[in-house]
Structures are given as structure tokens and as C-alpha cells.
Image (cartoon, rainbow, N blue to C red):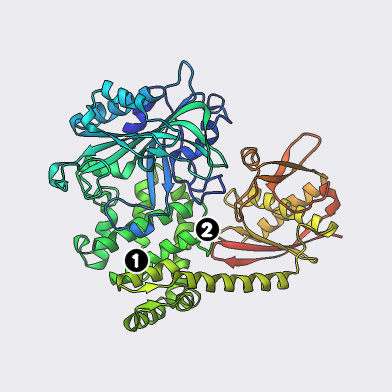
Amino acid sequence: MRKLYLDFFKARGHKVVPSSSLLPTDPSVLFTTAGMQQFSLYLSGKKDPIKDFDSRHIATCQKCFRTGDIEEIGDDTHHTFFEMLGNWSIGQDENGYFKEGAIKYALEFLVDTLKLDKNRIHVTVFQGEGNIAKDEEAINLWLKYGIPMERIKLCSKKDNFWGPVSATGPCGPCSEIHYDRGEELGCGRPDCGPNCDYCKRVVEIWNLVFMQYFKNEAGEYELLSQTNIDTGIGFERLLSLLSQTSASYETDLFADVISKLEELSGKKYLENKKAFRIISDHIRSSVFVISDGVEPSNLGQGYILRRLLRRVVRYGKTLGLSSQFYLPLIDLVIDKYKDIYPNILVRKEEIVEVIKKEEEKFEATLEKGLSVIEKMLSVKKELTGEEVFDLYQSYGFPLELTEEIATEKGISINVDEFNIALEKHQSISRAGAEKKFGGVGKDAGEEGAKLHTATHLLHAALRKVLGEHVEQMGSDINAERLRFDFKHFQKMTPEEIKQVEDLINSKIKEDLEVKKEEMELEKALTSGAIAFFKEKYPDKVNVWTMFNPQNGEVFSKEICAGPHVEKTGQLKGLKIIKEESSSAGVRRIKAVVNQ
């Protein structure tokens, strides 16, 4: 199916571009949620697709991850990880296409290539809202290409206006293509059709976005300097439709994983759909998220991963599965996708290690925690915020997991009280950290500047010696030393430590220039500056570049708010005094600079 789609658009002059990472460069969103995210600068006219792709026309199969529907996993249509097939026409010239080209290609692919029945195709069109007019052009084009008015439905902005992905960005009205799966799946109401509230007889399969606007920071819609086409097909949903199944869990994407779960548990999928589907979805998602560099934690992307893995363990318990039951499932997922996304095979050992360690952390308290929560729920109609927080702090139960278990028992919990208790705990922790580290921070003098500069040199050297997977996971500077936490899955050898140290000292000896530039965050990211978004960056950031003034060769380029020296020679030298484990998949280096 992937090949059919990509070959179809390749034959029509589209450049096939590989999927980008699940971790976006936009700090305002946690994950890549749509195929257009890697092209946002092109869609807004800030970058030239001809220069970078040699084409205005692009097609992709993009890895995506959405967090808003985790509680819905287990039904017929929701997934956390999914793939999105998409095609774009960016800007218009004699080679560009807009609404007519998008509609024509979509019908050709669905009817001529996939052999779907054109008489079962319904479409929705934007009805107009506020100062954005009804999409008469799209209506007339659907009529021109053979979709009668009775199968064209006008819908509001809620259903037929797409984007932007974050607070600001390109967006526009859209036409969604829906397919009638048959009367036997319907609700029988005379007005049944696309977006029916009562049944899933008519399902959406393809969204054609006519990108004409840019939503600015004031929430206003300005006309874009160019028009773009941005389309997306949910790959799993399309496979389900073509397989004539009610859910993609019943297609060949999940068949082997579900069969293995039946074998391991001795239970039948049809009698345990929810648990089987949650485990299948979450293991697949976890494999991809870890392969793109996420670690379980209590913040951001890491928190989502922790949530998924702890749900896997919990639902494994409900099926009577033993520890590490997921290992053969990981093998099956990797085998299924390795030819399309080879990175998951390259990082298999790391993926397994991360999941094992997270299970070990949770297993230590899971049985006791489940016993405590079951006891609470047997005598209460509501759990207080303090009780929920205690489950979180003492047994590692994320709020959402406690909510889920409580909901199954018909018990409510006080989320507001939980948030108050969590904030109180975090405030105490922050105060303790400030007291502990005393901090040579961004307002420090010469010593702080040296240590900030040394940290950048260390980061760059680690990436060059150990590989690009190395990412900063945390750092701390005090008057005596720097501490740097980074992603790496094994103890560094003495040879590797020496290589890193020697490389840093050679760059100190070269007396690299250290240049500071203030620029817009978006420009900083596109310029190649490293940032891993452990914090939310302001709109304007400082980019520090260390380069050889003789040949212009750049050694390090990072976004940082701290002070730095003017030349690396001011450091005189660096000595690594300790390399140790910090947490699962994270190593820690302590180092000093010579006086």
C-alpha cells in the first residue's frame, strides 16, 4: 500500500521524501502529529522547496504520534503511533497545482488505482465561518469530477478547517473524502452520512487541505503569500477499509502481534479486545518513540512514553502475562517495519533495554500499588487528590492510570486536589535543588563562562566520538566542576573517555572563536543549532558557535542562555574526573577545567 501510493505520486512528478523524526523541531508541540510538520517553513514561504527538493511536488509516508486520544485506545479507530500518507504542492507557478489538482489526483488514486466504488464516495466542504467564505470552488470541482450534490456535505470550521499544528502557522479550509462501508453498518437515520454522531458507516479516509491562510499570534487569519496543497491519508484506516475489517487491529499490521498475545496468554482476542489492542498499540508506539530518542521520565515526551509502558505492564497483568512478555512482541514489530524504518532495527538493543528497565521500576511497586488502590476503591466513592498523589509518588501510578482504574470501578477522583499536591511537591523539590547546587548559572562571572563553554565542547566531542544519538539530558555547573548527563546506553570505555578528552583539549589548543548571535528561534533551528527542548525557548534565542577562524570549520553550535568565553584557549584544558550511570540509558560525566 505504501509503495502503491508513493509510486502513484512519483509517476506524477512528485519527489518522495523520507519520514522525519517523531520528535519535531517546533518546541511548542511534543511530537510530530502530521505529515506537514517537516514542511512548515516551505508552506509558509520561508524556505524554497525547489532549492531543497528540486520540486514543488512532494509525497511522503510520515511517522506520526498523537497524545490526545490515549484513553480512546481500544476502540476501532484510535492509535497513538500511526502513519500518514501525504502529497503536497507548495506554492504556485506553471508546475504548481491547487484545489483542482488535489481533487483530480485523489479520485484517480482511490477509484482507478485502488478500485474503490466512486458511487460510495462522499465529501465534506467548508461551509464558511466568520470572515472566511464558503468554499464554492471546491464544491464546483467535486461536481465537475462526478460527485453529485447529494454526496457533498457542508460542514463547520470544527470539521472542515485544518490547522495550524501549533499556536501559529499555515492553515486553511479542507475537503474530507469519506467512504460508505455499507448500509448494514449504519444507524438507519435518514440523515446518516459523513461525521454521523450515531455510527461509523461512512468513514473519513483522506483529508485535502487547501492551505491559504496563516494564523498569527493575535489569532487572526492572514492570507499566505502562496497557496499550498497538503493532504493526508491515515494509513491504518485505509488498510482497514480495504481489508473490510471494522478496525486496523484486524489487518495484517497487527495480526502477528495479536496472535502471539493469544499464544502467550491462552486467551482469545475477541473476548479481550481492549487489553489486546492497548498492548499492541502501545508496544508499537514505544518501539518507535524510543528509536527516535525518547526516555521514560516524568516530563514531556518521556512522561507519555512512561504512561504507555506502564499501561502495557498493567494490561499484561489483567491477561495473566508474566514479566517481559513483551519481548517477542518487540521482535514482531521490528520485523514488520524494519525495511521501511531501518532505525528501529539499528536501535533494537536500546529499545529492549529501555522497556525492560521501565518495567523493572514499575514492577517493584505495581502489585502493592494495585492492592492499595483496589482496597481504596472498595470502600470509597471518590479518591482525594492527596490519595491519588500518594499513589503517584509511592507506587509510580501516573494520574491517568489511577483515573482509568477508578473509572472502571465507577469511582471519581479529585484532579484539582492532585494538581495542588503535585505543585506543592515540585516547589519543595525546586527549592531543594537550588540549595543543593548553589549554581553557577547564566549570571555567573568568568568561571561560569568557562564552564558553559566547556559543556558545549564536551557535548560536541561526545557526539563526534560516540555518535549522533548522544543528546543532552541535563547539566549542572558549580564553582568546582561541570556535570553533564547525556543519552548513551553503555559505560564509556577508557579509550572513548580519552578520545573525548583529547578532542576537547585539541579544540582548546586551536583557540576556536566563540561567536554569539541573537536570532529568531525558528531561524536558529533551521541554521543547524542544537536544541533538545528540555525547556520552552523564547521567540528570540542566543546561538553560540565555536569555529576555527582560519578555515571556518564549525565544531559546536548550540542554543544557550548562559555566558561564554570569547576564545576556547581561555580554558587552558579540561579533565574528565568521572563517568558513571545517571539513570536508565543516561550516562553522567563530571569534569573540571584547568585554572
Q: Position of residue 482 (x, y in %)?
A: 74, 62
Side (left or right) of 492 relative to 53: right
User: In which image quadrant can residue 168 be found?
Assistant: top right
Q: Nearer the viewer, residue 130 or 506?
A: 130
Side (left or right) of 135 relative to 441: left
Contact between marks 2 and 1 (CB within 8 A): the answer is no
Please tell me whether residue 78 is drawn above or below residue 146 in the rendered image. Answer: below
User: In which image quadrant can residue 106 be found?
Assistant: top left
How far apart, in angstroms, are the residues tagged by discs 2 and 1?
A: 27 Å
Q: Residues within 10 Å of mark 1 (few under 14, many from 20)?
A: some
- The answer, for residue 519, to whether it is visible in the render is yes
Q: Position of residue 569 (x, y in %)?
A: 84, 49
Callout 2, which amino acid? Gly
**On-image quarter of the C terminus:** bottom right
Q: Nearer the viewer, residue 526 or 504?
A: 526
- The answer, for residue 557, to whether it is visible in the render is no
Give the residue furthest to the front: 130
Q: Residues within 10 Å of mark 2 (few under 14, many from 20)?
A: some
Q: Judging from the image, what secondary structure is the residue with disc 1 in?
A: loop
Callout 1, which amino acid? Phe
Q: Judging from the image, what secondary structure is the residue with disc 2 in?
A: helix
Q: Of the residues under marks 2 and 1, which one precedes in the sequence?
A: 2
Label 2: which residue?
A: 300
Q: Which mark is residue 32?
A: none
Q: Position of residue 491 (x, y in %)?
A: 60, 63
Side (left or right) of 175 relative to 469: left
User: Residue at left 31%, top 26%?
Assistant: 139
Please tell me whether residue 474 is drawn above or below residue 94 in the rendered image. Answer: below
Label 1: which residue?
A: 325
**On-image quarter of the N terminus:** top left
Q: Position of residue 167 (x, y in %)?
A: 53, 45
Side (left or right) of 426 relative to 418: right
